[in-house]
Amino acid sequence: MSASPANADQFKALRLWYTKPAADGMNEALPIGNGRLGGLIYAGISHDRVVVNEDSLWSGDANPTGDYDKMGAYQKLSDIHIELQGQDNPQDYQRDLDLYSALSHVSYRIGDVNYRREYFVSHPAQALLIRYTASRPGSLTGKIRLQDAHRAVTESADSSTLLIKGAMPSSGIAYEQQLTVHAEGGKLSKDGDALILNGCSSFTIVSCAATNYVMDAHKNFHGDDPHSMVSKQLHAALAKTYEPIRTEHVSDYEKLFRRVLIDLGNSSSELERLPIDERKVLAAKEHDPGMEELLFQYGRYLLICSSRPGSLPANLQGIWNESNTPPWSSDYHANINVQMNYWPAEVAGLAECHLPLFHLVDSQLSNWRQATAAAKEYARVDGKPVRGWAIRTSHNITGGMGWNWDKTANAWYCQHYWEHYAFSGDKEYLRTIAYPAMKETCQFWEDHLKTLPDGKLVVPNGWSPEHGPVEDGCSYNQEIVWDLFNNYVQAAQALNVDAAYCRQIAAMRDKLVTPKIGRWGQLQEWMTDRDDENDHHRHTSHLFAIFPGRQFNVTTTPDYAAAAKKSLIARSDTDDVREWSFAWRTALYARLADGNAAYGQFRQLFSNRNSCANLFGLHPPMQIDGNFGITAGIAEMLLQSQSGEIQLLPALPDVWKNGGVDGLRARGGFVVSEQWKNGKLTFAEVHSSIGGTCHLRYGDSKVSFATQAGKKYWFGPGLRREK
């Protein structure tokens, strides 16, 4: 028995496709990546261009003072230029990105010759590959150039290989990229910094790149020169032919991507015939289930492509960047943006894609501890050493930070450590990685919370990003520290350690000032009741306790949930709302059990105001957190597990009348599939990966049952148990 909403053929529709090349920079280029290497495909006809990124190529240094200029920025690596002769009057042009296989294509016809290209970045091979073919032998003539983004001279290692190398003057990060061309038929030669194709029938480009960056503060984040690694990777790729590398790439990618299937209904054939740049505009105005499925799966695709074990975590632009001065430095913004990047990781079946975030944070801690201890904001009045660490709103990959201390960002990062355990039940991970980070952060807040005259505890001099004054007890700060303390207590109990300290933190949790309900029924953003009903600010920071937190919910704290909804409705004006704002609000409405309102926020992402032609989020400018956040928001509409029970279809909107989802994950180590018809649950499957008791709810129906690891359990309408 299976709850799969569709078979593998459904994935064939998961395709971004267009009838013209990219013209508006990275807002139209198609993204490919393997976690560490990224490519933006512009797909011109006579002049093709691929922007190449390597995730650790950063300017800046480890200066912890908050000097944004010294923090540096994520950098572009290079451009691959492919220029072809005889490309006049093309017909039937199409370019696409297939989310099922992580392959991008270009096809067109000139006269009676059909031209085709294929692009991908292989995780197993750690290489970018581009293949050009033509239906008539000898039809490919032109040249290939590799252009460094930092003005290094392109070298020719031999008649088929180009090489660039250099070092960032501020960070000292050294980089190298090698590119080799294999041509079939015709002739390949060298002319200065270009490789010349003459009368070829097909050719394949293989490129590898790396830096000397290592995630180790004790080595000042610098390792060996990258030349040996790049050469080794390139030689290994060249030892194979194209097809085996392609097959291995697709297999590796599909192991992650195919974990989750989703079916939200059928789109009209008229909509399905439209290219994505046209279709998405209509999807902002009318129901288009196929586009909605595509946007959900696009977030999963982008996370796989920009965050894999061994890579850095996804930044403000994921891994893709065409500029050396990108917006907001393409950094890690810790007041929601990097966290939103990882909201879908656990629930959408990509837990291993979450690991780079923990690895980066762990690697930065020694620098961040020093910066915190040196900061006047965190000086200990009792003369004792400052324990723990804090971070500013933005940071880089070498310990450096940008503007404005975000006091509770340390605790928000710890939520991700906890969630990875909550979904997996991996106690070894909890004991060795998550628990130490959580305990140290609890110690920081043990030292820095302020006691009010009534004995209550507040975060002093906090801020509700990016809104309002700096003052004590901002709801955002209070809720995040509550979340940290509550998760820590559960972690200590799960490991059966530190019982006395666990009791101390539980007592402090219960003394934290709880946000108030204000004069117009709203959840107050500050201790002072100053919230304005006409304030339509893009941030909803004070609603953290609804999502991604779990302090308030419609079942156990209905008054607070109702107040949160009042606040959310008051901020629904779109003048100051951004793509990531709509993603967050989708998840918030889902947690508030209002599926129709959640759907209304979700559909805003299709507007040209909020997304690019290639479906990247548009702040503006381009920003990727909304792509990840909306995947998580849709998942929350279909499945929730934050309150100790698995809720099936908790916020199903009316427009998703019939459908199914297969493979969403729930806390407690469960994988859940659901089917529904006429808006009602018809079937559910629960797969237990670690055993334990499962508490399952659908509407007013509830069932609890013991599970065994590796077993599946099936339920029909009304949670009727099926064999």
Image (spheres, grey):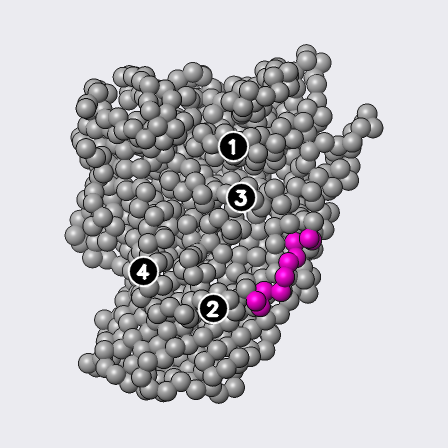
Q: Which amino acid does label 4 sit on?
A: Thr
Residue 234 marker: 2
Residue 357 marker: 3
Circle 4 packing at 10 Å, graded few (<14), some (14-19), many (20+), is few
Image coords of residue 608 (percent x, y): 38, 53
| Residue identifier under label 1 | 428
Is residue 203 visible to the viewer in this orientation of the structure?
yes
Tally of numbered tags: 4
Secondary structure under tag 4 reads helix
Comparing 90 with 646, the one in front is 646
Secondary structure under tag 3 reads helix
Image coords of residue 578 (percent x, y): 46, 45
| Residue identifier under label 4 | 247
How many angstroms separate mark 4 from mark 1 (CA)?
A: 34 Å
Pointer 4 and pointer 2: residues touching (CB < 8 Å)? no
Q: Which amino acid does label 1 sit on?
A: Glu
How many angstroms separate mark 2 from mark 1 (CA)?
A: 36 Å
- Say if 21 sits above or below 308 in the image: below
How many angstroms separate mark 3 from mark 4 (CA)?
A: 29 Å
Residue shown at 31% from the left, 60% from the top: 247
Tag nearer the camera, 1 or 3: 1
Q: Which amino acid does label 3 sit on?
A: Leu
Residue 672 on the magenta span: no
Farthest top residue in view: 454
Is residue 282 visible to the viewer in this orientation of the structure?
no
